[in-house]
Image: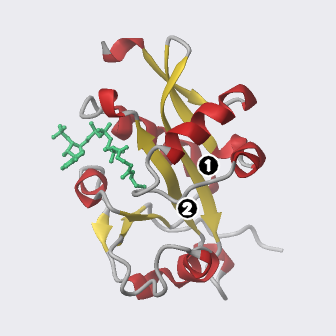
Amino acid sequence: MNNDLLIRPATLADAPHICQLIHSHKDDLLVRPLSDVIMNIDRFYVCDDNGKVVACAAWQILPEVGDPSKASVEVQSVAVDKSYRRRHVGSRIVKEVLKRVEAFAPTQAIVLTFAPEFFASLGFREVPKTSLMHKIYMGCINCTKYDNPFTCPEKAMALNLGTPRTPPPQ
Ligand SMILES: CC(C)(COP(=O)(O)OP(=O)(O)OC[C@H]1O[C@@H](n2cnc3c(N)ncnc32)[C@H](O)[C@@H]1OP(=O)(O)O)[C@@H](O)C(=O)NCCC(=O)NCCS
């Protein structure tokens, strides 16, 4: 029953389970060492089925070079245990991430993904990779799977989150 599944912020005790979940999807996700998951645990959500971590998702704010008011939020490390798929666990956890980051008023959420249908169901639309240069610069440049982010088969997708708030006058 989906009602038993709790989406909640991750704790340090979840870190090894998150790591295992990410590693078991290494063809679809960027593998993250345990130390990285621990250092970023405050930006992870998990789905908890009576104490078992069955899904995770994380986020990171990405600055827009030259325009500090237009930062994006990248949705990262979305993984759902195979036996829990197609029960809207993935949608619930990504929606929770989007709710969490609302407070920061980013202009858009972005993702690089092999699961475009899933993100399309959440309102994301495919965009040219050249529109996500901050991501290319900060993430793809360190990729060990593909030499060139523009020929890598992952799709770049974005969800518009509205106009950035005007900063208060100095
Ligand atoms: C992608 C993933 C997170 C989806 O999780 P999920 O809990 O099964 O997804 P949901 O049940 O919330 O799906 C919501 C909608 O997305 C779409 N969708 C999800 N998985 C899909 C698939 N494999 N093929 C086509 N559409 C899919 C459907 O429209 C679905 O709605 P429906 O089931 O009512 O038709 C999961 O398959 C996964 O962990 N994949 C491996 C890791 C990965 O690719 N992560 C994303 C990269 S960041």
Q: Is residue 169 left or right of residue 47?
A: right
Residue 78: image location, x then y, percent: 46, 47
In the rendered image, which residue does mark 2 sit on? Answer: 73
Residue located at (52% from left, 55% from top): 76
Kind of residue at badge 1: Ala
In the rendered image, which residue does mark 1 sit on? Answer: 103
Kind of residue at badge 2: Val
Q: Is residue 129 left or right of residue 20?
A: left
Count the marks.
Answer: 2
Residue 27: image location, x then y, percent: 41, 57
Q: Is residue 33 left or right of residue 146?
A: right
Residue 109: image location, x then y, percent: 47, 62
Q: Are marks 2 and 1 in contact (CB under 8 Å)?
A: no
Which of the labelled discs sits on residue 95, or is there none? none
Q: Is residue 160 left or right of residue 1?
A: right
Q: Quadrant of residue 128?
A: bottom left
Q: Looking at the image, in which quadrant does ligand 1 appear?
A: top left
Check the picture and name the quadrant holding the N terminus: top left
Q: Nearer the viewer, residue 56 or 108?
A: 56
Measured Cα–Cα span from mark 2 to mark 1: 12 Å
